[in-house]
Amino acid sequence: MIIVCMEDKKGNFKQYTLVFIAIVITLSVIFYFMFKIPELKRQVAEVNKEREFQEYFRDRMISAQRQLDSIYTEGANAEYMRSVFNTNLVKMQTRLPRKDSSYVHEMYEIMIINFQEISNLKEERIKLLSQIQQQKEELIDSYRTVRSLLPQDVKRKTHYHEPK
């Protein structure tokens, strides 16, 4: 009978040891997640905030592209459209997240600068095209003037050889 009791004590000790280990592991997991969950919540909030900003920035970029395209359409009030476009870029610039060590802030700034440069290049192109159109009209007018000053017989003569 004494031997049986010793075996029961050894079995009970093993059971108590296993229960103790299970309790320690459970408490360790609980304490780990108690401190980890607020950190995870903070990270999720940051990711959601960045996603919302990206959606806002994307919508503003699409709007800026449409405004840029409409500035130079025929019959549009170019000055007003240009001011609306510039206002949109300023709003985009002011909504940028604070500057941090990541490349994201610089990427957003580069996009805004690129929109400004595209706008400037389109404006220069329009000015250049209007200058070319004006020069073309002046050349046509001077051609007509010179042609009207020529005598009639010179106008009828051809300056090429007839094929034989």
Image (cartoon, grey):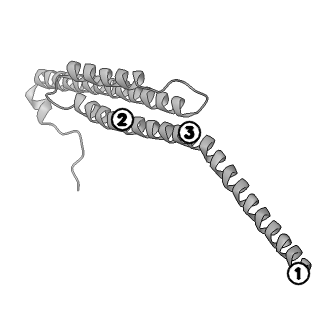
Q: Nearer the viewer, residue 78 or 87?
A: 87
Secondary element at image label 2: helix
Q: Residue at x 33, y 28 (%)?
A: 122
Residue extending furthest toward the right: 3
Q: Is residue 113 left or right of residue 17?
A: left
Q: Is residue 2 left or right of residue 57?
A: right
Closer to us: mark 2 or mark 1?
Answer: 1
**Coordinates of residue 161 in the picture (x, y in percent):** 24, 46
Task: Give the residue pinned by disc 3.
Answer: 38
Secondary element at image label 1: loop
The disc, 3 or 1, on the residue closer to the chain's N-terminal end is: 1
**Coordinates of residue 4 in the picture (x, y in percent):** 86, 79
Q: Is residue 41 left or right of residue 3?
A: left
Q: Nearer the viewer, residue 107 or 53?
A: 53
Task: Give the residue pinned by disc 2.
Answer: 56
Q: Amino acid at mark 2?
A: Tyr
Q: CA distance from mark 3 to mark 2?
A: 27 Å
Q: CA distance from mark 2 to mark 1?
A: 80 Å
**Coordinates of residue 113 in the picture (x, y in percent):** 44, 26
Query: In which quarter of the view is residue 114 placed?
Result: top left
Which label was assigned to residue 1? 1
The disc, 3 or 2, on the residue closer to the chain's N-terminal end is: 3
